[in-house]
Amino acid sequence: MIRHTIELTINNARADKFYDFMINPNDKKYNECWKEEHLQFHITKNGDENHLGDHVYFDEYLGEKKRLKFNAVVVTAEKHNKIVWQRKF
């Protein structure tokens, strides 16, 4: 298993607002964060009422030459604390 963890500090951010976006993403809001890098992040298939089983699509540039695109499924959703996506192959 490969685990990719991101920790970041965002001034004046609130965990509940960040979690709400990450668990219910949309391309418009994602692109507004960083227009040159963030391309798409949205739900392609809904799971249950807590978002477990949601399928998401993610696409962004990592600098000028790298691009990260993948489909994933939400396998953990602990409100305001933790979201885990398992990449689909």
Image (cartoon, helix red, strand yellow):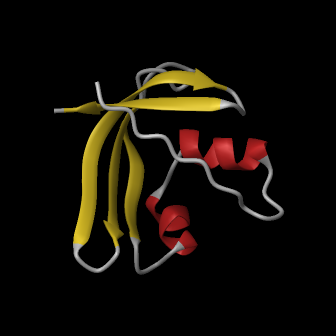
In the rendered view of the protein, which quadrant contains the N terminus?
A: top left
Q: Is residue 35 above or below residue 26?
A: below
At x 60%, y 48%, the residue is 7
Residue 53 x, y percent position in the rendering: 41, 22
Q: Which quadrant of the view contains residue 9?
A: bottom right
Q: Is residue 24 left or right of residue 43?
A: right
At x 48%, y 29%, the residue is 84
Q: Is residue 21 left or right of residue 16?
A: left
In the rendered view of the protein, which quadrant contains the C terminus?
A: top left
Residue 63 x, y percent position in the rendering: 34, 75
At x 26%, y 46%, the residue is 70
Q: Nearer the viewer, residue 8 or 60?
A: 8
Q: Nearer the viewer, residue 44 or 34?
A: 34
Q: Is residue 4 left or right of residue 9?
A: left
User: Furthest-right residue in view?
Assistant: 12
At x 40%, y 73%, the residue is 37
Q: Nearer the viewer, residue 22 or 65?
A: 65
